[in-house]
Image (tube, rainbow, N blue to C red):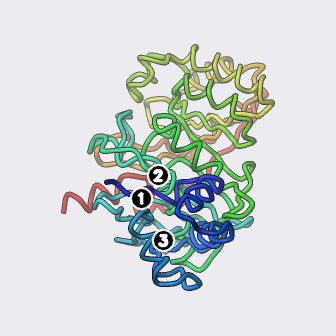
């Protein structure tokens, strides 16, 4: 009989489950605090519980956690790249970044990815499986415990497509936002998608005050389909229509991610077309100096080209910033460290 993933359960579910074992109600709070505030990896670490009770819990439940397999620290900016080993021997990556406002962790939502974007190292190895809510959450606990810091911001922009693991991602979001858990505010969370329209429509009904980031990377179908095969199913104009509806319903501004690739999507014509496509929408454009990924052959645009592209957007009245590139010396793009590790 498969054990229940207790860390993925909401407090009410934990309480009811422990009650069915004949345990008093205060035990649920004790177990919850160990799981969600301290991020323990085993029941043996729950030192205020008796050995008999810990054994009982261990027989019925499993705590899914992340173990640090490899860690790289950037000499340039202190960015930390983690390769985590999961309970079944699979590997995922997370990136810890330090900003003026605190620590931000970029987490993974799947082992591998089925989207197969041309510029992404994650999809090269194909899709393996979804992460549970507990495994997404455990990336935060593992980083915090390793660095003895408090993570204040979360970016769901690591390995995998969050909208392709929708139920587990939504459960994670509610767990990480819990007042008696990590208590990370929704406004400090950004969820990135390559453009899964049904997921965007579902998300707008969740009443979550997070930031939706849409990986656009091109202003038209011709270019975007070459970079992102998902565009065949969800073309640019349909995607932007869903995004406009999301912004209207939620009153939340969408962040459009636009990785800059030399000679591919960085022309003046692309900038003008992008500005026109986003006219009259509640939008922010985030230009990204792309990290070179060996598997793709794509190269980042020059700083001069990115600056000029940004100026065209600004003159058209669009809200635009250029993302500061972090971790360039440690292969901070998700998928690169895992790919190197499993191929060695």
Label 1 sits on residue:
93
Given residues 229 and 91, the one toward you in this image is 91
Identify whether 102 is placed above or below 200.
below
Residue 166 position in % (x across, y down):
52, 37
Label 2 sits on residue:
108
Is the residue marked by circle 1 packed among few (<14), some (14-19), or many (20+) residues within 10 Å? many
Residue 132 position in % (x across, y down):
45, 50
Q: Determine which of the numbered discs, if any, sits on residue 10 in the image.
A: none
Distance Cα–Cα, label 1 vs label 3: 15 Å
Name the secondary structure under disc 3.
Answer: loop
Q: Of all residues shown, which one is farthest toward the front?
A: 22
**Residue at (49%, 41%) from the top-left corner?**
301
Residue 299 position in % (x across, y down):
40, 43
Distance Cα–Cα, label 1 vs label 2: 6 Å
Image quadrant of residue 201? top right
Q: Determine which of the numbered discs, if any, sits on residue 74 in the image.
A: 3
């Amino acid at each position: 009989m498969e054990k229940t993933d207790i860390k993925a359960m909401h407090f009410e579910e934990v309480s009811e489950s422990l009650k069915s074992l004949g345990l008093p109600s205060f035990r649920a709070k004790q177990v919850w605090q160990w799981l969600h505030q301290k991020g323990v990896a085993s029941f043996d670490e729950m030192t205020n519980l008796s050995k008999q009770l810990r054994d009982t819990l261990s027989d019925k439940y499993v705590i899914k956690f992340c173990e640090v397999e490899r860690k790289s620290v950037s000499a340039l900016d202190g960015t930390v790249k983690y390769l985590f080993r999961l309970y079944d021997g699979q590997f995922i990556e997370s990136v810890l970044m330090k900003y003026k406002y605190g620590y931000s962790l970029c987490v993974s939502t799947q082992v591998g990815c089925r989207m197969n974007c041309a510029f992404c190292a994650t999809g090269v190895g194909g899709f393996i499986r979804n992460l549970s809510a507990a495994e997404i959450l455990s990336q935060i606990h593992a980083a915090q415990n390793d660095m003895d810091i408090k993570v204040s911001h979360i970016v769901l922009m690591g390995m995998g497509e969050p909208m392709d693991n929708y139920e587990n991602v939504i459960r994670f979001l509610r767990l990480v936002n819990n007042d008696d858990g990590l208590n990370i505010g929704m406004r400090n969370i950004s969820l990135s998608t390559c453009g899964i329209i049904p997921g965007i429509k579902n998300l707008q009904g969740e009443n979550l005050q997070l930031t939706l980031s849409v990986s656009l990377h091109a202003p038209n179908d011709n270019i975007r389909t070459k970079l992102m095969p998902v565009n065949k199913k969800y073309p640019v104009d349909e995607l932007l229509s869903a995004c406009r509806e999301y912004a209207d319903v939620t009153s939340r501004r969408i962040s459009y991610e636009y990785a800059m690739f030399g000679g591919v999507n960085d022309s003046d014509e692309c900038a003008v077309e992008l500005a026109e496509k986003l006219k009259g929408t509640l939008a922010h454009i985030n230009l990204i100096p792309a990290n070179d990924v060996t598997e793709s052959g794509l190269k980042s645009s020059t700083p001069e080209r990115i600056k000029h592209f940004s100026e065209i957007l600004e003159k058209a009245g669009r809200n635009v910033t250029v993302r500061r590139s972090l971790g360039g010396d440690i292969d901070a793009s998700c998928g690169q460290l895992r790919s190197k590790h499993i191929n060695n």
